[in-house]
Amino acid sequence: MKFMAMCSSGLGSSFMVHMNIDSALSSIGASGVEVDHADLGSAAPADADVFFVGKDLENSVGEFGDVVILDSIIDQDELVAKVREACERHGIPTTA
Amino acid sequence: MNAFLDVLVQILSQPSILVALIALVGLLLQRKAAADLMKGTVKTFVGFLVLSAGAGVVVASLDPFGRMFSEVFGVQGVVPNNEAIVGPVLQEYGTVAALIFFFGMILNVVLARLTRFKYIYLSGHVALYQSAMIAVILMVAGFSPVEAVIWGSIAEAVITTVSPAVVQPFMRRVTGNDKVALGHTGGFGIALSGLVAKATGGDPEKSTEKLSVPRSLGFVRDSTIVVALSMGLIFVVVALVAGPAYVQTEISDGQNYLLWAVMSAGQFAAGVFIILAGVRVILAEIVPAFKGISEKLVPNAKPALDVPITFTFAPNAVMVGFFSSLVAGILGMAVMGVAGSAVIIPGIVAHFMTGGASGVIGNAVGGRRGAVLGSFANGLLITVVPLLLLPVLGEIGTANSTFGDSDYGVIGLYLGWLGMAGGQLLIVAGIVAAVLALFGASAIMGRRQGRRAAEPETVPV
């Protein structure tokens, strides 16, 4: 199972969201999920099972499958909730 | 014994090995398993070599462009693109830059712990670029590598603590809380945007978000496309002016001049792409370690994060800000062209990132007027700054690219001009003065807060 955070340069914000997804996953007790980050240009739909982007990029992600749009990329509560939903969608058990 | 030491110095002077060791330290501090230690260290090592390879590609595309530009217009043509300049800088001053980056992060945590400016600068890529610039300026000013690392780390720590602080009053307006700060080298320009928005008295109710902006402009979020298209335009225009005869005989070795222009622009974009890939790998192990350590050592730490964190709050403002900033850049370029100075070609990525954030902040403070005028001010700043920076960068300043964001100007000119005025001594004095000023400001803020807390509650009149 792989989650991928994306942004336009693949450096700053996607990296930050990547780290936040890592902490979200440990806070809900999910395991077995690999997390990575990339720029929109080089990411391909086959690279991950779930993609996370900020709302300002929602028009640039048409080719990707399961996309989670974040209203704010700094709101950890929103991210934890959406990570939990993504885990449920893909059958990842959570303990918290 | 001497031979052994000699080899040791040779090894540590390889920046790729040095950043790998920094990653190793970070991984060890996080008590990672042996397999992860090895993976992370080796990956970081290779990542730096990827970056160097990208640098080669970028320089190969820009050199002929630079020659063509000077031949045609008689002045230096400079493209402000952080990745393009950092490649060659890291190849020349990589060891000093890497050490300034490493110690700069440590001192950032120390300053956050000791002062009221609890900002932990987590945008590793721009911190790395900024460290590289500081390395160049100090080495050009004549410091030895060891001295450059000592004073450079302190300077880097100061700017990475101060930059988020000047933007914070505006970030609070945008995010609605004080928990997150802006950590980006465009900080000063973005803060300027907020000030201009405030001074021009726009109405925040007349927000950019009430406008409708065309959706098809979404492609500007893909930096590879934007860089390729914009450089394509620039290369083709300059090639057209230079004319087929000149290009085909002097530059392209017979290849059709327009084809050459397009291929070179593509090569530039490819080089930037490779550099970004390398930076991503280098930071992948280092930044999480930094984040983890700062969280333990600095209670109430405020992460200072990359500009796109502002974009979701006002997506239309991002586009408005980008265009306004870009217009300022184009105007600035025209003025430089007429004035006969070196010409700073607008750096599209810089105008997008810093212009976009300036738009969001300008909009939060002063609505549409604030967004437009604030970003315009930012655009002017990031056009003038690279021009002023050229002389203090030494030989790197004769390269065809330079650093594109406002903070590079703030710290670069501070150090560079001190160096030109009074040499190394004045630079050291300037750095010490900045540190003292930081502690002073923190103390004053603390006393003011203490006094306010001690005052009895009064009924507002």
Image (tube, grey):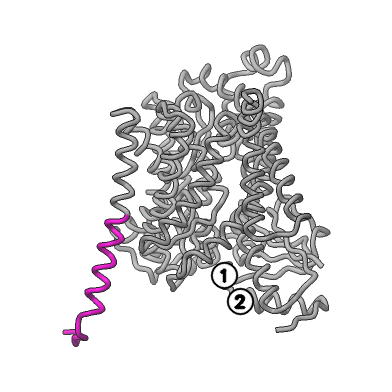
Identify the image quadrant of the N terminus of chain A: bottom right
Residue situated in front as seen by the camera: B230 or B92: B92
Q: Which residue is mark 2?
A: A78
User: What's the residue type where badge 1 is placed?
Assistant: Ser
Q: Residue, x 41% and y 66% (percent of image)?
A: B364
Q: Which residue is mark 1?
A: A72
Q: Residue, x 73% and y 65% (percent of image)?
A: A51
Task: Find out whether residue B146 is within the magenta segment.
Answer: no
Q: Is residue B303 left or right of residue B440?
A: right
Identify the image quadrant of the C terminus of chain A: bottom right
What segment is highlighted magenta in the picture? B439-461
* Residue B179 percent location from the top left of the image: 46, 70
* Residue B188 percent location from the top left of the image: 39, 51
Q: Residue, x 62% and y 57% (percent of image)?
A: B29
Instruction: Classify residue A24 by image quadrant.
Output: bottom right
Instruction: Classify residue A47 by image quadrant.
Output: bottom right
Q: Residues within 10 Å of mark 1 (few under 14, many from 20)?
A: some
Specify the principal SS of the magenta part: helix
User: In the figure, B184 relative to B297: above or below?
Assistant: above
